[in-house]
Image: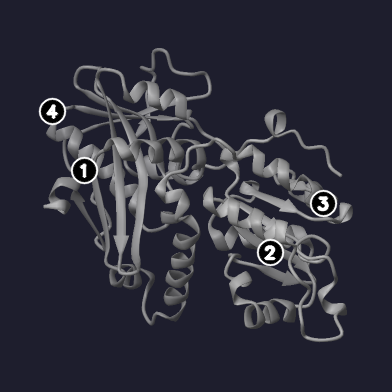
Amino acid sequence: MTAFDPLAAFDPDRVKCVVWDLDGTFWDDIAVESPTDELPTPRPEMLAAIDALAARGVLSSIASRSAPAVLDRLTDGRPEVRERFLAPQVSWQDKSESLQRIAKDLGIAVDALVLVDDSPYERAEVEALLPGVRTLDPADVPALLAAFEGREVTPESRDRVHRYRTEETRRAEGERFQGTREEFLRWCAMRLAVGAATPDETPRALELAARTHRLNSSGLTPDRLRELAASDGHELYTARMTDRFGAYGVIGAALVDRTAPGAWSVPLLALSCRVAGRGAAAAFLFWLMGRAREADAEEFRVTLRPTDANLEMRILLRQAGLRRTDDTPGAAPDSAVLARPLHGDLPKPPPYLHVSDREDAEA
């Protein structure tokens, strides 16, 4: 059994998907050694754990070194079990390769995965090649569940599995679509509605601050975000997105500091990785710039803390004309402030994405 102390060495905010081995973990027996097409019976405690994690907004997938036909048998014979898993990988490839494929298919960082596997060899292979991935023995699952106890669950979290299934439909439609990527995005009829955060959206904004990494400008902690959002001169904005497939929910949050004369400063800009590559991050940023100019601000600033994960955000800020400024009193040692003037033409959102003020969208 692996030693597991969630209070000392485990950050549940980073976990977006738990990946389950099958043989000896999800069920007792070895599926390919079954004398019939009947699959082994899943362990009830593992099914219960998967459902408990889903209720907390944590996805589940499969990484099993077995015959690919096992997944087909699971799909055909036990669809109620198969539907619990997103982007499953059943093949003879190494577990580290399966985990990288799962992360890519889900659009999340590899180190947002946790592997549950009964084999010390498989866990060691993943730990050696993917050191950011936490690996657990099945006996550690109760401690894993306990690490999520008492944490606030937003509506977006409770609906996360459904939203990722909708994302699978989007991806499949995109692969079948006859046309360019931009034509497909236009066909999707995406709409972004931005406005001041309502009280019931604040928990989701805190969640985005904690759980997003690719499209997160500063890594501001939820506690600090809550403190700043409640202070004078600060405003919290959120962005909601929909398309022809359904609603994404709240996919973006931005904290605006208006205490400096003539400037709008953004200590945090964070967006869900589910909307990466669709122009939503750029559209949200450009909306904030436009709102700042309407408020007679002359300069727009964003706090940036560069990380290995947020290259996409750094590129976006540079493309939007923001450059590092030396006028950064009180800035954290690992952070910088990027700024740009608000005179002249401001960048426009992608033509395939309709952006509106929340008030206009609800009218």
Quadrant in which the N terminus is drawn: top right
Label 3 secondary element: helix
Looking at the image, is mark 3 or mark 4 nearer the viewer? 3
Please report contact status of discs 3 and 2: CB closer than 8 Å, yes or no.
no
Please report contact status of discs 3 and 4: CB closer than 8 Å, yes or no.
no
Task: From the viewer's perspective, tell me whether residue 102 is left or right of residue 141.
Answer: left
- The residue that disc 2 covers is 62
Residue 317 location, x and y as percent?
38, 40
Identified by mark 4, the residue type is: Asp
Q: Which residue is at the front of the view, 167 or 22?
A: 22
Q: Residue at x 58, y 65 (%)?
A: 86
Crowd tier of the residue under label 3, counting other residues whose Cα lies within 10 Å: few below 14, some 14–19, many 20 or above: many
Looking at the image, is mark 2 or mark 1 nearer the viewer? 2
Measure the alpha-carbon separation of dots 2 and 4: 53 Å
Task: From the viewer's perspective, tell me whether residue 230 is left or right of residue 358.
Answer: right
Residue 90 location, x and y as percent?
72, 71
Mark closer to the chain start, 2 or 4: 2
Please report contact status of discs 1 and 4: CB closer than 8 Å, yes or no.
no
* Residue 80 appearing in the image: yes
